[in-house]
């Protein structure tokens, strides 16, 4: 899998515009790679909120705000996931990282614990930052 994953804060219009090239340099962003971001968002939300993966998927989460025919997409993180991440204690983030590593291992996907921890702690920090009005947290995958 060769994927770039960028989490960023933007207005909906800017998020849609990000489809072609990713978020612009004016938006605070986190850059990672080589994991299925859509599945990760579902995994994390399911684990943090107790709503089943299947229920989230059936309800249309994560919301795709833009996509092209070549695999790039922009996903909106649900407010429930953003709120859960922002409220998570250090021990809850550590537990989520350990759980995610184990969950991916069951699927045959290797995610190193230090990498999972950096991804999740960085995303938690992003969710805790004060945001301008009308901005939300998005994920660009390309």
Image: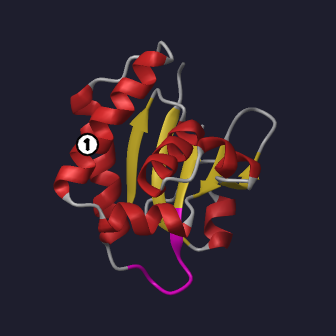
Which residue lies at the image location 39% right of the left edge and 44% below the top edge? 31
Say which of 109 and 57 sits in front.
57
Q: Quadrant of the N terminus?
A: top right
Residue 107 colored in magenta in the image: no
Q: Position of residue 15 (x, y in %)?
A: 62, 63
Say which of 73 and 50 sits in front.
50
Name the image colouring. Answer: secondary structure
Q: Quadrant of the C terminus?
A: top right
Image label count: 1
In which quadrant of the rendered view does residue 36 lie?
top right
Q: Which secondary structure type mostly characterizes the magenta part of the structure? A: loop
Q: Position of residue 118 (x, y in %)?
A: 25, 41
Res 20 seen here? no
Relative to residue 92, is residue 102 depicted above or below? above
Relative to residue 39, is residue 26 depicted above or below? below
Res 39 seen here? yes
Query: Which residue is denoted by mark 1 in the rendering?
Result: 95
Extreme residue toward the top, this view: 108
Mark 1 residue crowding within 10 angstroms, few (<14) / some (14–19) / many (20+):
few
Which residue lies at the image location 59% right of the left edge and 74% below the top edge? 11
**Left or right of 70: which side holds 33?**
left
Q: Position of residue 13 (x, y in %)?
A: 68, 71
Which residue lies at the image location 32% right of the left edge and 58% below the top edge? 124
Extreme residue toward the bottom, this view: 133
Extreme residue toward the right, this view: 69
Relative to residue 140, is residue 106 depicted above or below? above
Q: Secondary structure at mark 1?
A: helix
The boundaries of the magenta stretch are 131-137
């Amino acid at each position: 899998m060769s994927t770039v994953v960028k989490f960023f804060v933007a207005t909906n219009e800017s998020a849609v515009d990000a489809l072609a090239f990713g978020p612009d340099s004016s938006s605070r962003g986190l850059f990672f790679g080589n994991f299925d971001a859509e599945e990760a968002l579902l995994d994390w939300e399911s684990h943090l909120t107790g709503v089943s993966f299947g229920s989230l998927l059936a309800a249309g989460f994560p919301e795709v705000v833009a996509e092209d025919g070549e695999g790039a997409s922009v996903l909106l993180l649900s407010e429930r996931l953003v709120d859960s991440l922002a409220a998570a204690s250090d021990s809850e983030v550590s537990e989520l990282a350990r759980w995610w590593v184990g969950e991916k291992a069951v699927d045959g996907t290797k995610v190193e614990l230090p990498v999972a921890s950096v991804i999740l702690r960085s995303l938690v920090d992003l969710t805790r930052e004060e945001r301008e009005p009308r901005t939300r947290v998005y994920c660009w995958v390309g």
